[in-house]
Image: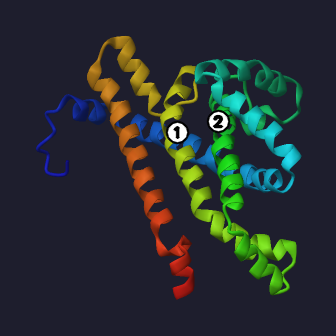
Amino acid sequence: LTSGLWNDLSIIKEYTGRADIFWTEALRHVELAIGSLIAATIAGIPLGILCYKVERLRAGVLNTLNIVQTIPSIALFGLLIAPLGWIAATVPGAAKIGIAGIGMAPAFVALFLYSLLPVVSNTVVGLAGVSQAVREAARGLGMTPVQRLLRVEFPLAMPVILTGIRIVLVQNIGLATIAALIGGGGFGVFVFQGIGQTAMDLVLLGTVPTVLLGFAAAITLDALIDSNLFSAGGRKKA
């Protein structure tokens, strides 16, 4: 790329003519994917802990989130347009903070809703997988339930929780492409422009960075999950 050997490729020519727009849409794509992931993690992990502790609540929450996952992304984006548009029109200050029927707001909310199930379910599975012997040992040391959760159970469940976060991040990077259909921006802008113009080089300008971004995110989180930081051996060495 830096040597200029690929400058004659059609995708590089498309990038050269759209460099400013490309990086603007790239930033929007990352904001949608990572922002919705952060919001889902902040909301999903406590919800997962609650579902683990209150078994009667678990089935209802997970079934509801499963239903959300079955809704096609285009349909969910469309369903969110009306309520978010109503909020923007009736709630003072809502429009000023970016809430609107079209644009990034419905795309962000949809990605957030899609992200909850993997985070919540993996939190429940991770906590449920902690050995009973470990729990009894922590209880024998005089730890309170909160101390056991924060200092023993949650660290041991972290690799499973991170696996759910990895799934969400890769999923969101792909789904954020569709946000362009409702004005959410992102790499999907080039994809749908290229489809409309039957220009495959323009389609590739949107799809290739999306694939590379998802690939890099998966590798990075896989390395984090497999690192000593979250392994029992790593904690013993520390």
Say which residue appears at 84% left-offset and 49% top-offset. Answer: 55
Q: Secondary structure at mark 1?
A: helix
Q: Nearer the viewer, residue 143 or 208?
A: 143
| Image location of residue 178, percent across then percent down | 52, 26
Side (left or right) of 90 relative to 82: right
Q: Check disc 2 and give the amino acid type.
A: Tyr
Q: Nearer the viewer, residue 163 or 13?
A: 163
Residue bearing mark 1: 171
Ranked by sequence position, the earlier of labels 1 and 2 is: 2
Say which residue appears at 84% left-offset and 57% top-offset. Answer: 53
Residue 238 visible in the current orientation: no
* Quarter of the picture holding the C terminus: bottom right
Q: Choose top left, top right, bottom left or bottom right for residue 108.
A: top right
Q: Choose top left, top right, bottom left or bottom right for residue 70.
A: top right
Side (left or right) of 200 relative to 161: left
Say which residue appears at 66% left-offset and 32% top-offset. Answer: 110
Residue at the far left in the pictured view: 5
Q: Residues within 10 Å of mark 1 (few under 14, many from 20)?
A: some
Residue bearing mark 2: 114
Residue 222 visible in the current orientation: yes
Question: Could you tell me how many numbered marks the image carries?
Answer: 2
Q: Check disc 1 and give the amino acid type.
A: Gln
Asked if the residue under mark 2 is in contact with the one under mark 1, i.e. CB atoms within 8 Å, the reply is yes
50, above or below 198, in the image: below
Side (left or right) of 30 relative to 91: left
| Image location of residue 198, percent across then percent down | 31, 13
Say which residue appears at 45% left-offset and 41% top-offset. Answer: 26
**Mark 1 and mark 2: span between their CA atoms?**
9 Å
170, above or below 160, in the image: above
| Image location of residue 60, percent across then percent down | 82, 37
Q: Residues within 10 Å of mark 2 (few under 14, many from 20)?
A: many
Side (left or right) of 161 relative to 99: left
